[in-house]
């Protein structure tokens, strides 16, 4: 099976995780947007519904108001039938009667609040009018072209909205054929104003208009919409209307919608352009009773749209919050599950650990018992070893002495021979009475004896057994060792360089002397083949230990023998000359005192042994 490299595997995990997070974020975004959109649609629909219901009520109320405003005057033209002066004027017109009727009509007009009341003869000419005394009076005017006249002459009630041909004032005309003995003898006309309705709408901030049978807006809360066509007029109707002068010379432009959309349930949404800003309205229309007119109500959709947008925003925020809470809950659930798993794993590990501890404790107890047995065995062995070591030291010492016996004998023989000669000479000088010379000889004899005594004393001291404890003077030990080796040193002409200061060291005096004798005599041995022979004894006082280096300028030690130097009975010396115990013993003596013996092979040649020994402990105060 081929394994992916660790870094590629980690990369793959990171990428998968990133992809999962990214798709989750996209999903959440879609969810939030979707919920916002759904809330918008719902809110919009219910808002339109509510608006439509309240619009319906408004429409109903205002339609009633318009109807009552119109019907308020319906009776008025027929009322003139009751006035005898009117019928008399129609039948037998005189200036006097006209004046009377004019007066009557003016009074009636004032009381009823209409715009004008006038009477037409059968030719359609105005024979009396309430505004007879004004400059723009209708008196004498031919209004036979007016539809309301034609309807009334035929005995029908005339209803007409139009713009006055004389005054140019818009009004609602109601006409009635005046009868005498069942015959129409003239027409009574009342012109009323309906603009109070417009004022009322404006005060109530209502947008509404009334369109007539031709689809022309005759009443509107917005004056600019007045006399606009709610639907396109064909050329024939346009011409017909122009000829009738119903709307005077108005252009009758079409009311322009920026947009028109059916919303279902008979509802319609339209957009109107108000100086560049588009406003949307809910459009509701209702026919007005007893007229061919329609009342249209425009309810602005702005607020409802804002509310829908706000609801959409709220829904989106709520959805986002819910999603966030769900994610947080899920994360928390995961954390708790992880913690539980970790706790269980910890518990299991703990149990396992305890089981292992119990096992190990038992093992340890067993091995402890074994170790205790071993310790006592080792102690036993150590005691035996120490005894053996002591014996070995002793043996080594004796070996050194044995080695030195020839030179010691030589050393002692020389003064002995001198003593023999001196004593024989002294006897002769005494016999001759030469006391001065005899005394001088005796002096020499005493010195020779002293020297011999010293040699034997140091040999005895070297051979003596010593303990691990003690304190030594470095200078004394060096002096003693040099004295012991004096004959060899003299014979071999080795130059000793002492480059150390006196120091007190924590080792038995005799042992230090033994070590020094071993090291110096090894150096002397090594220097034998050398022409110029030197041994340097140099000291270095460190914080914990004192270092004494015994260096010679001999041939050095061959690399293959270096590893074996401190092995017992390792020697390169021929015949009986070497026992191979000197370095072993010296190292073990140094170690017993808490120090060490090491070897260095200087680059300039020769060999250097470094003896490291501790300082004596300060006596406790
Ligand atoms: P022995 O002196 O009886 O041979 P040692 O233990 O004292 O035993 O020395 C072991 C060996 O180490 C010597 O045989 C010698 O080869 C080598 N040796 C010791 N000191 C020196 C030295 N200063 N220079 C060269 N070789 C040395």
Image (tube, rainbow, N blue to C red):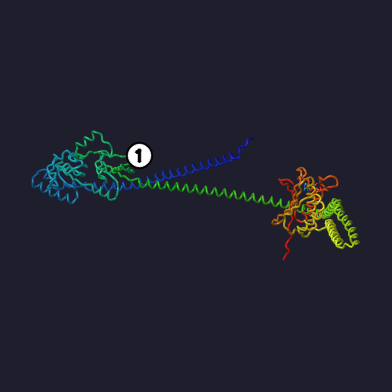
- Residue 9 vs residue 279, the one in the foreground: 9
Q: Quadrant of residue 447?
A: bottom right
Query: Residue at 31% across / 44% down in the picture?
Result: 298
Tell me if residue 436 comes above or below residue 118 in the rendering. Answer: below
- Residue 500 vs residue 225, the one in the foreground: 500
Query: Residue at 35% across / 39% down in the picture?
Result: 261
Tell me if residue 525 comes above or below residue 447 in the rendering. Answer: above
Graded by Cα atoms within 10 Å as few (under 14), some (14 to 19) or many (20 or more), the crowding at tag 1 reads few
| Residue 377 spot, x, y in % from top left | 82, 53
Element marked by disc 1:
strand
Q: Can you identify the residue that label 1 sits on?
A: 261
* 495 relative position to 63: left or right: right
| Residue 120 spot, x, y in % from top left | 14, 42
- Residue 504 vs residue 151, the one in the foreground: 504
* 165 relative position to 262: left or right: left
Instruction: State the residue lying farthest toward the bottom.
Output: 621
Could you tell me which quadrant the N terminus lies in? Answer: top right
């Amino acid at each position: 099976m081929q394994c992916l490299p660790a870094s590629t595997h980690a990369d793959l995990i990171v990428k998968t995780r990133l992809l999962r997070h990214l798709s989750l974020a996209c999903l959440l975004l879609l969810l939030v947007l979707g919920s916002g959109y759904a809330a918008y649609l719902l809110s919009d629909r219910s808002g339109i519904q509510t608006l439509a219901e309240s619009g319906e009520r408004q429409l109903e109320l205002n339609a009633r108001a318009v109807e009552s405003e119109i019907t308020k005057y319906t009776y008025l033209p027929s009322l003139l039938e009751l006035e005898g002066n009117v019928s008399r004027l129609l039948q037998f017109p005189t200036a006097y009667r006209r004046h009377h009727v004019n007066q009557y009509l003016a009074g009636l007009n004032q009381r009823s609040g209409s715009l004008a009341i006038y009477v037409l003869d059968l030719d359609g000419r105005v024979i009396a009018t309430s505004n007879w005394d004004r400059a723009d009076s209708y008196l004498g005017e031919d209004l036979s072209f007016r539809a309301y006249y034609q309807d009334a002459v035929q005995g029908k009630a005339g209803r007409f909205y139009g713009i006055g041909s004389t005054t140019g004032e818009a009004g609602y005309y109601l006409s009635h054929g005046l009868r005498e003995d069942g015959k129409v003898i003239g027409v009574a006309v009342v012109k009323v104003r309906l603009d109070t309705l417009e004022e009322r709408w404006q005060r109530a901030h209502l947008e509404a208009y009334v369109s007539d049978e031709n689809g022309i807006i005759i009443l509107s809360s917005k004056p600019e919409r007045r006399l606009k066509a709610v639907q396109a007029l064909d050329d024939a109707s346009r011409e017909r209307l122009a000829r009738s002068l119903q709307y005077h010379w108005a252009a009758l432009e079409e009311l322009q919608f920026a947009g028109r959309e059916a919303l279902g349930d008979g509802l319609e949404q339209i957009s109107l352009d108000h100086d560049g800003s588009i406003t949307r309205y809910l459009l509701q229309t209702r026919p007005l009773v007893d007229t061919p007119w329609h009342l249209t109500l425009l309810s602005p959709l702005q607020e409802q749209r804002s509310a829908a947008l706000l609801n959409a925003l709220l829904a989106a925020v709520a959805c986002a919050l819910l999603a966030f809470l769900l994610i947080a809950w899920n994360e928390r659930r995961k954390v708790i599950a992880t913690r539980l798993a970790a706790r269980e794993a910890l518990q299991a590990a703990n149990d396992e650990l305890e089981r292992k501890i119990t096992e190990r404790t038992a093992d340890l107890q067993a091995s402890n018992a074994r170790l205790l047995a071993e310790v006592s065995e080792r102690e036993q062995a150590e005691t035996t070893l120490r005894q053996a070591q002591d014996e070995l030291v002793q043996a080594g010492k004796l070996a050194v002495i044995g080695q030195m016996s020839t030179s010691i004998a030589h050393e002692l023989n020389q003064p002995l021979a001198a003593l023999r000669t001196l004593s024989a000479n002294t006897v002769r000088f005494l016999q001759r009475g030469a006391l001065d010379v005899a005394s001088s000889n005796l002096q020499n004899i005493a010195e020779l004896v002293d020297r011999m005594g010293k040699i034997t004393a140091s040999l005895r001291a070297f051979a003596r057994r010593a303990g691990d404890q003690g304190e030594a003077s470095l200078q004394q030990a060096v002096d003693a060792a040099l004295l012991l080796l004096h004959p060899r040193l003299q014979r071999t002409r080795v130059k000793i360089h002492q480059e150390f200061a006196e120091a007190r060291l924590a080792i038995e005096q005799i042992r230090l002397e033994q070590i020094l004798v071993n090291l110096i005599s090894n150096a002397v041995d090594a220097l034998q083949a050398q022409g110029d022979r030197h041994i340097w004894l140099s000291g270095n006082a460190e914080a914990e230990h004192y270092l004494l280096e015994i260096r010679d300028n001999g041939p050095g030690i061959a690399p293959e023998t270096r590893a074996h130097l401190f092995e017992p009975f390792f020697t390169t010396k021929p015949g009986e000359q070497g026992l191979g115990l000197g370095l072993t013993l010296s190292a073990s003596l140094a170690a017993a005192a808490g120090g060490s013996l090491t070897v260095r092979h200087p680059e300039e040649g020769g060999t250097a042994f470094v003896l490291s020994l501790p300082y004596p402990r300060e006596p406790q105060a």
